[in-house]
Amino acid sequence: MQSRLPITIFAAVMAAIPFVPGMPPFWIVLLDNIGLAALVAMGLVLLTGVGGLTSFGQAAFVGFGAYTTAVLSTAYGLSPWLTLPLSLVVSGSLAVLLGLITVRLSGHYLPLGTLAWGLGLFYLFSKLEFLGRNDGISAIPPLSIGTFKMLSPGSIYYAIWVAVILSALLTMNLLDSRTGRAIRALRRGHVAAEAFGVHTPRAKLLVFIHAAVLAGLSGWLYAHLQRAVNPTPFGAQAGIEYLFIAVVGGAGYVWGGVLGAAIVVVLKEVLQSYLPLILPGSGQVETIVFGIMLVALLQLAPGGLWPWLISFLPEATRGKKPDTSLKLEQRTRSPGEASILLQVEKARKQFGGVVAVNNVSFDVQAREIVALIGPNGAGKSTTFNLITGVLSATSGSISVLGKKVDNAPPQEIVKLGISRTFQHVKLVPDMTVLENVAIGAHLRGHSGPISSMLRLDRADEAKLLAEAARQIERVGLADQMHQLAGSLSLGQQRIVEIARALCVDPMLLLLDEPAAGLRHMEKQQLAKLLRDLRDGGMSVLLVEHDMGFVMNLADRIVVLDFGTKIAEGTPATIKTNPEVIKAYLGVAA
Amino acid sequence: MNTTIMLFLVQDGITNGAIYALLGLALVLVFAVTRVILIPQGEFVTYGALTYASLAAGQMPGTAKLALALGIGAFGFDLFVARRALHGRLILRSLVTNVVLPAVVLALTVYFAAQKPPVAVAIVLSLVIVAMIGLYLYRIAFQPLAHTSVLVLLIASVGVHLALQGLGLLFFGAEGQRGPAVLAGSFTAGALRFTGQSLTVYGITIAFIVGLWLFFGLTLYGKALRATAVNRLGARLAGIRTTLSGQIAFLLASVIGALSGILIVPITTLYYDSGFLIGLKGFVAAIIGGLVSYPLTAVAALVVGIVEAFSSFYASNYKEVIVFMLLIPVLLLRSLAAPAVEEEKD
């Protein structure tokens, strides 16, 4: 975790600003607005920048927060402090509802879906009688503590910025945790995260709710700052603007949201007050400039301004090495463990008319290295996907330790002690090696999002990181532990994937082309590692094209060709098998 | 409710639906080729409509100047990109398509606007002006981003929409406008009255649907455009000029948008910001069509039009709410039906 010093300084500066003599009250108003926008943008950072879920509809959640407190504090006379939790609950529960529908949407459908409900809800706000239709609701009571009423922008200023800084802290705590790693893995697709037990729809729903609650908080503050609400600030335009703020600031960074809010709010103010002087005409000139700047920004600095800004700062201190003496609970292994670990029986997978895997049967015994080989397109990776639950088999059965696991989801397979690597490396490039590997231990930790936000997860977290560090040392990448995974060579990234798979504490390790991209020495080290793992009681099933590597390492080889098993046996028998030679060289030798 | 009202609503819905279908088709087209979700499609509609209405009323539309300004911008982009390998023919070609052409059109517009041109001239001028805007926009805003993700393109698309809508207010003011009918006259069949205008709408819509369907399904060039959408690099390696494909898609989309605008502005009063909502309804249709299927999009557009007509009769306050919320269950069904393929990102 980064030092708390910068945040403390920031908080102190923000607290001191209203006391600066001669500070124009208008600047305080601007700062209030920046704080309100920053809250929403922070949620979007988590949602869009980190989680990869684009939402144009955040303004609607601001509206829910604002209207909830507006209705309850005017029509029912509730105290604003009572309506705060209610505002958050309303935003949060509507996020659950909309999220359940929307989060399942993939790719570009999601932003369009959010745009649609953003618009729909805006019209709903402006048509409902009890929300005051287009006129909205006015005469909302101010926030008050005792007899002190926060009537002026200067007095609610503290409420707003306490909310911003607290939210930023909680959000950063969340990101730096077991749950946070699962969220950060979302953007890279769901297959890798699910292979280590992450329930991705649930993780997506979580960030959706988090972003909505932050937006609701902003709305609640907004209602009590303006003391009136109407539908306009919660429309599609506002939803777009929030996204703009996040993109300007740097959608991947919590403080990028705050920076973006500051830039956009100030810029809007400047444009609104000076543009009419340069370009006289009927208003809305700022939207033109806005639109043009958005496009220009995407072309020139797609990462936003925050990463650009921190690149001037001295490089952050390297994270310290976790205390590797902390141990996680190990999987209980019965001493008389069944000798057949994995049994594949007549597994079949059809994609339309193509039979990718055709009634393939084989098994993996305890303490054994089995290699699955065959020419390209033989169905090796598909077989892996069938075993790990990424794909469901058309027919046939797969059992682990004698128990059928047909069509179980990946999250269940990994619980049985089967972990894997991928043919195409699936690491999160902007996370460190340590963090990537720690995703492998996801199921061995227990802390949820709330305890992560409140930092009650540290004991659990330390054990997870210790386990990750141990596995990284085991595969020989201790020096790269704190580097970003994306900065490693492809061969090293494959090794990182193995460390991640080892974090599961597996009984069976599935490796998809682990030696591809490795140099000769590295291959020898890998072979030694795999032998050590076998001797330590683990089994390995690997797909590999490097025949020298396979022949020296495997205890048994299964050969596939066009989805069908054509041979099985020891390396020595496979080498001379005429079917195999024919499959590889085309003619019987 | 009696049959007459129902028939009337259905007819109204079909006329609107036909327009949504046209827009939906353009959206599908642009998305299929460039992966851009074209939010500014709605601005093409208003620009087309209001340029046409202004010209017909003998006013000078600001869009002609915008076309020239964007053209000069596009020329600048061309020069900048080719700065290391500038040669005469390249510069000349870019100059003619990006600067000379809009300048000529601007001159023609000034000339005709002063003397209230006939409907046909106004239509042609409006179409050409908006087509050029579409083309240059692609060059300036989207071509430099062509390699990025759908999401980045979508955000850029929103930026373009904002800028164009603001410019629309500058050009046409906050007042709504109506244009003269493209085809006058009407006849009645039973209780229903068909105007020449609505028949034109149906005719043009059907022609475009069939045309696009045939173009993309049967011709080699249509297939090349589709290949660009699936894999830009692969398409380039196969000798397809991906930039040209994008330009064609934007050209077609802006023409379709402007045409839709010209077709509806005699029926409904349009404001500078009406296009956004109209375009979004085209979206609802396009999304129901999965952003790939032309016939499905057309059918969906008719459904959207009819739902809109009925909800404006029964719950006029909630018309927009109903239309946009219609999208949610559709999106849900679509994503449930879609196979859980992994998208390789970044």
Image: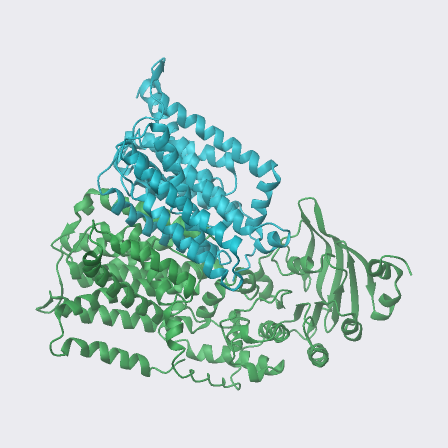
Chain colours: A green, B cyan
Percent of width and height locating residue B253: 44, 41
Percent of width and height locating residue B70: 38, 51
Percent of width and height locating residue B118: 33, 27
Looking at the image, which is closer to me, A243 or B306? A243
Residue drawn at (41%, 57%), measured in percent from left and top?
A54
Q: Is residue A243 visible?
A: no
Q: In the visual, does A326 lie left or right of B18?
A: right
Residue furthest out toward the front: B88
Residue drawn at (31%, 29%), measured in percent from left and top?
B266
| Quarter of the figure with the N terminus of chain B | top left
Percent of width and height locating residue B43: 35, 44
Q: Quadrant of residue B237?
A: bottom right
Q: Is residue A452 above or below residue A43?
A: below
Residue drawn at (70%, 47%), measured in percent from left and top?
A354
Q: Quadrant of residue B314?
A: top left
Residue furthest out toward the top: B190
Residue drawn at (47%, 37%), measured in percent from left and top?
B297
Q: Is residue A381 visible?
A: yes
Residue furthest out toward the right: A589
Q: Quadrant of residue A27?
A: bottom left
Q: In the visual, does A300 lie left or right of A429?
A: left
Q: In the visual, does A202 lie left or right of A393?
A: left
Q: How many numbered circles are shown?
A: 0
